[in-house]
Image (cartoon, rainbow, N blue to C red):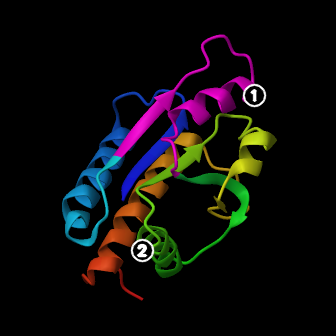
Amino acid sequence: MRVHVCAVGRLRTGPEKTLIDDYLERFGKAGRAHGLGPAQVIEVEDRKNAGIEAEALLLARAVPSGAVLCCLDERGAQLSSPEFAAQITGWRDAGRQDLAFVIGGADGIAPGLRAKADFSLGFGRMVWPHMLVRVMLAEQIYRAGQIVAGTPYHRV
């Protein structure tokens, strides 16, 4: 199952981008044997600053047809890492070919796009900067792959 991280905004070269690239590359390498990966980041940018509805249109276009749509939202389900891994493998085992995680801009994700989501995931009730959400998501995707593979990376 291919994984797509669709996010508003461009991440410049720096420590966050380095971490994201590293975690997603490691996920892609380790996940192949388990039907997971590769993973990629798709960045969209509302250059006209037209707001969250315009961002939602760009994000929707970035999501592959037929993909599981998972919105990152502070109101979303708060899962443990093993629960997150089980959610991903459940979609994989159901025959889903693509999984798209959507990260909105500064104002979040438009209600219409959130309503279309198959799942909504939260990293707690706090609001996080999009660059840190990307890092946390990339690490959790990698961790999920390691849980599925049965490696000692995830310790209970």
In the image shown, does 156 or 97 lie closer to the viewer?
A: 97
In the image shown, does 127 or 72 lie closer to the viewer?
A: 72
Q: Is residue 126 visible?
A: no
N-terminal-most mark, 1 or 2: 1
Q: Which residue is mark 1?
A: 53
Label 1 and label 2: CA atoms lie apart by 33 Å
Q: Position of residue 32 (x, y in %)?
A: 22, 63
Magenta span of residues: 40-67
Q: Position of residue 77 (x, y in %)?
A: 68, 68
Q: Quadrant of the C terminus?
A: bottom left
* Type of amino acid under label 1: Glu
Quadrant of residue 140 within the rendered picture:
bottom left
Check disc 1 and report its element: helix, strand or loop. helix
Q: Quadrant of the N terminus?
A: bottom left
- The residue located at (35%, 43%) in the rendering is 40
Does residue 45 appear to the left or right of 89 in the view shown? right
Quadrant of residue 97 within the rendered picture:
bottom left
Q: Is residue 96 visible?
A: yes
- The residue located at (56%, 31%) in the rendering is 61
- The residue located at (53%, 50%) in the rendering is 101
User: How many marks are shown on the rendered structure?
Assistant: 2
Q: Is residue 34 above or below residue 142?
A: below
Task: Answer whether residue 25 is magenta in the image.
Answer: no
* Type of amino acid under label 2: Asp
Q: Position of residue 67 (x, y in %)?
A: 51, 51
Q: Which mark is residue 93?
A: 2
In the image shown, does 41 or 87 lie closer to the viewer?
A: 87
Q: Which mark is residue 38?
A: none
In the image shown, does 13 or 115 lie closer to the viewer?
A: 115
- The residue located at (74%, 29%) in the rendering is 52
Check disc 2 and report its element: helix, strand or loop. helix
Q: Is residue 20 above or below residue 43?
A: below
